[in-house]
């Protein structure tokens, strides 16, 4: 009996010591590893029509990730989800040869097109990381932090800086494994904390996409990127059958030397982190260059430049009589559960006030984007914004703040009888021939975020600028009313919290550039990091520049590129 008790005590002490030893390791810090396959996040999707509303879905990278029979909940289009984590909403084109619509996971609505290859089978690509050519770097870093409540948090960073990045949440420990989720892509992460190593798995629902081993480092992370073979020149842009007619710069009298100088300045790093430069003149695409591994097929994070697209959707809704006018009051269609926030000043907020950044809300403090999007804030984005105090009378003073267009998205969503992302596609993107894009949602993960949550290819962003230059027409078709374009380009307010006190339209900026003694007027969409559309009516020109200057105070570098290179090339 005594011998049995002794053995039990020894075993218990051994087990306890082992647990203490395993848990005593401090995992805080940076852990680095390598992705075994750079194409792991390039998915091939196949959807086969079976009997009735049943479909067979397969999603494959180098292995089969999903292989299931699913039933559509709609007879008019394909609508189903897997474990409330992966959502499909697709419809047939008129000829039944293409399925278009959305795959949604996390906060992203990915617009996809699946082609009919016969036998009721449709296939296509889905690139959750936006990249069509695999990762440029196989490096991955996991940064682990100790929270105040003695739990762990982990944040994943990929060496390929073209990817928008992950946003970790929902941390949970299960024995020696830390579980968390990327709210952007919806991917799950499973990090097993072992002695001197972390085994990391990335999952789609509950299927492993890829896995790797990470080791701790005290050195600063210097990721390695494989160069992409790409050249930049002033040749006639490629014809991609996307609606653009191409021409050579000499056909529209643009100075080649200035654009060559621009390319050289980007190569020499005098102009840093420039990802694309495109120019349209006289309705033709005449200049198109990409850098740092970007190409014409990769949707770029637009940040606040997509606010101008949000403005377009309000105009389209007014054209459709879904919204009566810009004089409609915000609180007429704020959800009932938020009506308690209405007061004597907030009740006066009009759609026009939101479009011109003059709602009067405290957008630089308690209705500031970083505040209402703070993951430590237990309240919803909408609750936080609507509970924020008023600091000015609506329509009298303009401070730039994403809360204003965010409320426009909520308002329009309440007015529609169909999903907002579907309305946007039917009324704007499809008529422009825009098929490769991503629409990000707000914190509800159901409603597109009008404060700056879209990703478009630069060619498609240039289409949007050309649409406005042509007073709402694209290739002869009126998509937005000419009246709305004219109203949008009005000068209603000056942004008081901006250094230049820019005049401001309906989510469009105004600026003037002095070139060779001449004042050139530009109407602009602007986004953090250097995402710009420049519309220059007197030169019949549109320019688009995308960049990656998010943390170096060079977000306005595209304005320098326009002034020092593009406008001199056009005016010559």
Image (tube, helix red, strand yellow):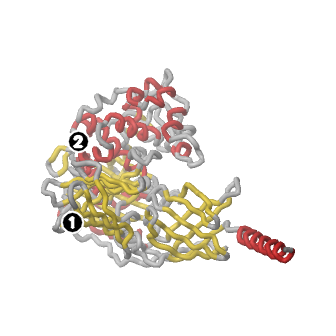
Q: Which numbered marker is on residue 121?
A: 1
| Front one among 447 and 211 | 211
Q: Is residue 92 left or right of residue 211?
A: left
Find numbered disc 1 in the image and state the secondary structure of the residue it sits on: strand
Q: Position of residue 556 (x, y in %)?
A: 45, 54
Q: Position of residue 364 (x, y in %)?
A: 54, 39
Q: Secondary structure at mark 2?
A: loop
Of the numbered discs 1 and 2, the one sitting upstream in the chain is 1
Dot label at residue 452: none
Depth check: 119 or 522 in front?
119
Residue 518: x %, y % from top left = 32, 49
Residue at the (60%, 66%) spot, across then down? 177
Q: 351 and 417: which one is in front?
A: 417
Residue occupied by mark 2 = 480
Q: Is residue 18 left or right of residue 562?
A: right
Answer above or below: position of 474 versus 380.
Answer: below
In this rendering, position of residue 532 left or right of residue 73: right
Residue 549: percent from left, percent from top: 48, 60
């Amino acid at each position: 009996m005594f011998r049995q008790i002794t053995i039990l005590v020894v075993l218990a002490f051994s087990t306890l010591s082992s647990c203490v030893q395993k848990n005593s390791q401090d995992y805080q810090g940076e852990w680095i590893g390598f992705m075994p396959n750079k194409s792991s996040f390039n998915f091939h999707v196949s959807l086969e029509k079976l009997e009735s509303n049943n479909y067979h879905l397969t999603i494959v990278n180098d292995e089969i990730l999903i292989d299931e029979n699913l039933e559509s909940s709609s007879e008019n289009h394909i609508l189903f989800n897997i474990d409330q984590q992966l959502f499909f909403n697709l419809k047939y084109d008129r000829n039944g040869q293409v399925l278009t619509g959305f795959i949604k996971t996390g906060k992203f609505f990915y617009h996809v097109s699946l082609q009919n290859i016969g036998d009721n089978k449709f296939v296509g690509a889905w690139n959750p990381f936006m990249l069509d050519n695999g990762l440029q770097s196989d490096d991955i870093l996991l940064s682990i932090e100790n929270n105040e409540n003695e739990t762990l948090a982990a944040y994943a960073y990929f060496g390929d800086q073209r990817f928008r990045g992950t946003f970790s949440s929902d941390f949970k420990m299960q024995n020696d494994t830390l579980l968390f989720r990327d709210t952007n892509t919806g991917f799950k992460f499973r990090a097993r904390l072992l002695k001197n190593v972390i085994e990391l798995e990335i999952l789609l629902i509950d299927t492993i996409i890829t896995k790797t081993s990470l080791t701790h480092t005290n050195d600063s992370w210097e990721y390695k990127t494989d160069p992409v073979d790409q050249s930049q020149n002033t040749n006639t842009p490629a014809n991609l059958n996307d609606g653009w007619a191409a021409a050579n710069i000499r056909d529209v009298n643009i100075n080649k030397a200035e654009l060559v100088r621009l390319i050289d300045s980007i190569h020499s790093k005098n102009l840093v982190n420039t990802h694309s430069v495109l120019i349209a003149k006289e309705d033709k695409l005449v200049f198109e260059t990409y850098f740092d591994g970007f190409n014409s097929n990769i949707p770029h994070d637009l940040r606040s430049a997509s606010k101008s697209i949000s403005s377009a959707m309000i105009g389209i809704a007014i054209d459709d009589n879904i919204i009566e006018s810009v004089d409609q009051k915000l609180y007429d269609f704020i959800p009932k559960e938020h009506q308690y926030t209405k007061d004597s000043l907030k009740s006066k907020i009009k759609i026009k006030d939101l479009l011109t950044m003059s709602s009067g809300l405290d957008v630089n403090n308690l209705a500031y984007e970083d505040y209402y999007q703070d993951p430590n804030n237990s309240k919803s984005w909408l609750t936080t914004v609507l509970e924020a105090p008023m600091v000015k009378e609506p329509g009298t003073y303009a401070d730039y703040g994403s809360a204003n267009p965010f409320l426009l998205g909520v308002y329009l969503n309440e007015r529609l009888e169909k999903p907002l992302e579907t309305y946007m596609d039917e009324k704007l993107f499809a008529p422009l021939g825009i098929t490769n894009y991503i629409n990000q949602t707000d914190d509800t993960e159901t409603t597109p975020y009008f404060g700056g949550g879209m990703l478009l290819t630069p060619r498609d962003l240039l289409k949007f600028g050309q649409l406005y230059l042509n007073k709402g027409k694209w290739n002869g078709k009126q998509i937005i009313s000419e009246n709305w374009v004219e109203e949008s380009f009005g000068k209603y307010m000056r942004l008081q919290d901006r250094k230049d006190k820019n005049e401001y339209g309906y989510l469009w900026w105004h600026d003037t550039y002095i070139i060779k003694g001449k004042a050139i007027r530009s109407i602009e969409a602007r986004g953090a990091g250097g995402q710009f559309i420049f519309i220059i009516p007197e030169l019949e020109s549109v320019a688009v520049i995308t960049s990656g200057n998010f943390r170096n105070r060079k977000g306005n570098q595209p304005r320098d590129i326009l002034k020092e290179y593009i406008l001199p090339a056009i005016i010559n």
